[in-house]
């Protein structure tokens, strides 16, 4: 029979073919004894079982069917796996089943594989319910936002023998997303050692999602890990060869992998301990004692952004093309000031110059940007009523966010923000003083300053945030996506490290003096020059020394380079 398994069908079930070097590396790491048994959940065409058989043969074994086990929901893939294994002279116990319903006769020494990656939007119904039940059986509660891989990791552990090992290819979401917090905590509680291997380059052809290799060793119900270890490689070629994780004689010994090699080689694992087990592991991506020092509670120089005030989500119109208008379009419709509110246009490119004042809003409006929000009063004008009727004729009122509110044309808005905070970022997060007192939509976050911060003035605080510590912190608390952009969700933005109110107050005079020049430099694309001068004004060198400042800048540049490299974009961490 000829099976058709298109890329779209594989994507629908979260299946991505694993490059053989990755499978071989994980199998070589996980299998250490000729008698070891292995399970490949979501086995697909059994690339990991092939690699496991090769490893067992290298260890002197003749792999028996009882040593190789695989399970997959997709019957055609299991059939192909069985034929491929048989063609190689191998037999395995292969089962067609939902992994969350699968039951094994006995625990195994190793679990290796590439769990399906299905985003929460598509992972629903009975499949999601079964996955969450399986995770809960291991004491892990997953939210409705969790993608499929999270439950796979937790459930897979239940098949491991004491002392066993788990090597998986996972989305790098493991390190940063909020829904993975219970998975991160679970791994540290259930294994004696947790290691990660990351790649600066994309290693799955045609797939933008960044991956990480999870190497969890020593399955235990007793003392467990309190830290993670991480090695960063350029690409698949760095798995082997001089300085790689695989030497000429096979997988390097634990002593070699513990950093006995030259620290400049990609084989080195660096340790990092989270403050709390479920915390994001993005801190493991950089080694910067200077950052940790300046963020120390006893220093008091930097604090979270929510110490300045209260963050708010922007308004959600449900139909920006209808509600957000440029001045020329508003005049054409005959809409007057009573029908409209001043608006920060959708997007954030115009918020990169520290201050949004009335002149800037007029200039944007003259350029055709949507600086007005349709927001008529309870008794709309004749022109507003005509526009509402036109919207209904076009079906705007049936858009989801519109049809669930009454009246549909009244957009709920947060209070006016003192500071606008960019949400999607290329170079780094930016804060902009909202001197024009415009409303904002959900393409940016808004910050209402507390009294102490308000006395300093929003422009001073926006400039104070243009420093190297905040730039590095943005990379650590935020997350990157396929296009290489840095995204800060509201809870992440609230944790953004910024100068404390006390530090900013002590530098307020110098910051005000520098503000006009800073705006000119930003207009010329000289963000790094602005950042360096703000570092000087804040006295960053006095806090961590010249070498410490350089550490912070270099750590941030590496993270930006890595974020952009995964999207196939220039790796420079400089101005943009």
Image: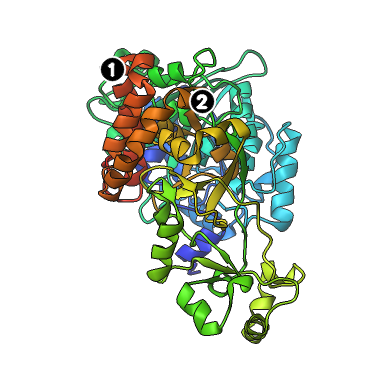
Horizontal and vertical percent position of residue 532: 29, 31
Q: Which mark is residue 500?
A: 2
Q: Is residue 54 visible?
A: no
Q: What residue is drawn where x is 37% and y is 48%?
A: 353
Horizontal and vertical percent position of residue 413: 66, 58
Residue where numbered disc 1 is placed: 546
Which secondary structure lies at badge 1? helix
| Quarter assignment of residue 556 | top left
Of callouts 1 and 2, the N-terminal one: 2
Q: Is residue 530 visible?
A: yes
Using residue 323 as the reference point, say whether residue 427 is left or right of it. left
Q: How far apart are the alpha carbons under marks 1 and 2?
A: 21 Å
| Quarter assignment of residue 61 | top left
Which secondary structure lies at badge 2? loop
In this view, the residue farthest toward the left is: 242
Using residue 568 as the reference point, say whether residue 394 is left or right of it. right
Horizontal and vertical percent position of residue 404: 75, 68
In depth, the one of 302 and 476 nearer the eye is: 302
Horizontal and vertical percent position of residue 502: 51, 22
């Amino acid at each position: 029979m000829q099976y058709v398994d298109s890329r779209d069908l594989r994507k629908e079930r979260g299946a991505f073919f694993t490059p053989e070097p990755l499978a071989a590396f994980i199998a070589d790491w996980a299998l250490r004894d000729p008698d070891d048994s292995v399970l490949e959940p979501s086995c697909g065409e059994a690339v990991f079982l092939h690699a496991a058989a090769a490893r067992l043969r290298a260890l002197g074994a003749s792999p028996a069917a009882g040593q190789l086990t695989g399970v997959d929901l997709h019957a055609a893939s299991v059939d192909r796996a069985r034929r491929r294994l048989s063609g190689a002279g191998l037999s395995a116990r292969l089962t067609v089943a939902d992994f969350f319903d699968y039951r094994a006769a006995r625990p195994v020494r190793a679990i290796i594989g590439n769990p399906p990656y299905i985003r929460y939007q598509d992972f629903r119904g009975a499949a999601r319910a079964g996955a969450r039940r399986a995770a809960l059986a291991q004491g892990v509660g997953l939210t409705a936002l969790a993608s499929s891989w999270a439950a796979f990791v937790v459930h897979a552990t239940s098949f491991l023998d004491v002392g066993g090992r788990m090597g998986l290819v996972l989305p790098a979401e493991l390190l940063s997303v909020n829904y993975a917090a219970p998975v991160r905590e679970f791994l540290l509680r259930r294994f004696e050692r947790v290691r990660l291997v990351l790649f600066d380059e994309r290693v799955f052809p045609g797939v933008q999602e960044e991956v990480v290799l999870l190497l969890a060793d020593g399955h235990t119900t007793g003392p467990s890990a309190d830290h993670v270890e991480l090695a960063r490689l350029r690409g698949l070629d760095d798995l082997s060869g001089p300085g790689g994780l695989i030497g000429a004689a096979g997988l390097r010994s634990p002593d070699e992998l513990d950093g006995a090699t030259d620290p400049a080689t990609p084989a080195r694992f660096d340790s990092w301990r989270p403050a709390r087990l479920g915390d994001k592991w993005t801190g493991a991506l950089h080694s910067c004692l200077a950052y940790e020092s300046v963020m120390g509670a006893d220093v008091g120089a930097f604090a979270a952004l929510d110490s300045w005030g209260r963050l708010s989500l922007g308004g959600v119109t449900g139909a920006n093309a209808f509600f957000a208008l440029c001045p020329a379009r508003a005049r054409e419709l005959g809409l007057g000031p009573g029908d409209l509110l001043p608006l920060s246009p959708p997007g954030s490119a115009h918020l990169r110059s520290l201050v949004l004042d009335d002149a800037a809003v007029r200039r944007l409006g003259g350029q055709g940007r949507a600086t007005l929000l349709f927001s008529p009063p309870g008794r709309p004008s004749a022109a507003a009523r005509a526009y509402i009727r036109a919207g209904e004729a076009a079906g705007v009122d049936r858009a989801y966010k519109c049809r669930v509110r009454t009246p549909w044309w009244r957009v709920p808005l947060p209070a006016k923000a003192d500071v606008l905070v960019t949400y999607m970022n290329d170079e780094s997060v930016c804060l902009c003083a909202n001197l024009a007192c415009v409303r904002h939509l959900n393409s940016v976050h808004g910050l209402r300053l507390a009294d102490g911060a308000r006395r300093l003035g929003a422009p001073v605080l926006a400039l104070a945030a243009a420093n190297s510590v905040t730039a590095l912190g943005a990379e650590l608390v935020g997350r990157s996506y396929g296009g290489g952009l840095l995204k800060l969700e509201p809870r992440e933005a609230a944790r953004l490290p910024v100068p404390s109110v006390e530090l900013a107050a002590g530098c307020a005079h110098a910051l005000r003096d520098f503000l006009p020049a800073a705006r000119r430099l930003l207009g010329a694309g000289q963000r790094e020059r602005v950042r360096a001068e703000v570092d000087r004004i804040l006295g960053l060198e006095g806090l961590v020394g010249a070498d410490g400042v350089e550490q912070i800048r270099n750590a941030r540049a590496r993270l930006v380079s890595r974020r952009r490299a995964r999207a196939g974009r220039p790796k420079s961490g400089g101005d943009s």
